[in-house]
Image (cartoon, rainbow, N blue to C red):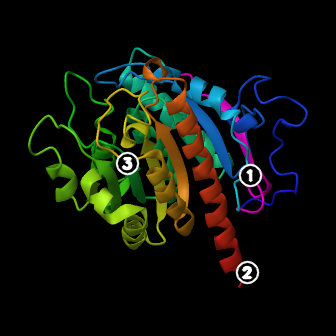
Amino acid sequence: MTEVPRTGSRRIDSHVSPRYAQLPTFMRLPLDREPQGNDVVVIGAPYDGGTSYRPGARFGPREIRAESGLIHGVGIDRGPGVFDLIKCVDAGDIDLTPFNQHIAMETAQRHLTGLLKDNAAFLMLGGDHSLTLAALRAVHEQHGPVAVLHLDAHSDTNPAMIGGEFHHGTPFRHGIEEGLIRPEAMVQLGIRGHNPKPDSLDYARGHGVRIVTADEFAELGAAGSARLIRERVGDLPVYVSVDIDVVDPAFAPGTGTPAPGGPSSREVLALLRTIGDLNPIGFDVMEVSPLYDHAGITSVLATEIGAELLFQYARAHQKKEKENRT
């Protein structure tokens, strides 16, 4: 992990500037459009050209940033603030065409690959889930095939449909077919709802992916699911992808394909705490569609998830540094 001075990432000081003031960046991080030497770079992906039902995720990064002014970097009973432990900046958005899936995918992949040449990891704010394929291609270039923890109501291992090769139901099918993912070290959690065909989960299961349905998660709980994830992923580099619709729409209505019967926001946040026991190398929080949100609650939750991912990255890499010293 990058050596960071005690001042850490120089955020806007809320004791000087009210949290509702200034241009919104994620958690009031400094804006740096050409970042270098950071542990995690926050990057927006305003795009919904792969959406199959309700559009609007192109506005997700903007609303997440706007709501993120609420969140401090210091968690209760967690010791130092996350930005005293790791160096982070907000790099703004990737400029993505809304008119062509292939060009958008290539642009996102090129941009994310460039970020990883000069920084250790990224947290991508979406945007629809199709762009997770671009992220997987970028991390594969740095780390080879990776383990994946995928939180979602949907498996997203469907084939192309209606002429859309890269719609938001396809990224993990492409990831498996392209050898970007270690399917035996992949866990999909929260899966539920309706599928186009009775065999919609056969592709993932047939390749060795461990699917934890929403009902199974309810039986296992966060602790039991965390044990399962640790057993599957081990010490492999792991990419963590969170589709906000993994959470029940009672807690996250602002999304394109809501599915009732999911876990609560508290349960998902509790589960994410296991990531600090793993070897995370990249993250995304996808599918926030503010057009269907109420009082910003979905964007607030996405912010909280992003903040949790950053803290768990710091915890994991502090642990790794400690092991390297002993």
Query: Looking at the picture, which amino acid does disc 1 mark?
Result: Val
Q: Secondary structure at mark 3?
A: loop
Q: Secondary structure at mark 2?
A: helix
Residue 108 visible, this angle:
yes
Whole-percent x and y of residue 245?
A: 38, 37
Q: Nearer the viewer, residue 78 or 43?
A: 78
Query: Looking at the picture, which amino acid does disc 2 mark?
Result: Arg
Residue 156 located within the stretch drawn in magenta: no
Q: Tell me the residue that label 3 is attached to.
A: 263
Whole-percent x and y of residue 257?
A: 31, 29
- Is residue 267 found left or right of 3 in the rendered image? left
Q: Tell me the residue that label 1 is attached to.
A: 74
Q: Tell me the residue that label 2 is attached to.
A: 325
- Is residue 289 found left or right of 273 in the rendered image? left
- Asked whether disc 1 touches disc 3, contact meaning CB atoms under 8 Å apart, the reply is no
Crowd around label 1: few <14 · some 14–19 · many ≥20 (10 Å): some
Q: Is residue 187 above or below residue 264?
A: below
Q: Is residue 275 above or below residue 128?
A: below
- In primary-sequence order, the first of circles 2 and 3 is 3
Residue 92 located within the stretch drawn in magenta: yes
**Which quadrant, please, contains the N terminus?**
bottom right
Whole-percent x and y of residue 45?
A: 53, 29
Residue visible at 54% across and 69% down?
Answer: 277
Residue 178 visible, this angle:
no
Q: Nearer the viewer, residue 108 or 127?
A: 127
Q: Residue 48, located in which quarter of the rendered image? A: top left
Measured Cα–Cα span from mark 1 to mark 3: 25 Å
Measured Cα–Cα span from mark 2 to mark 3: 39 Å
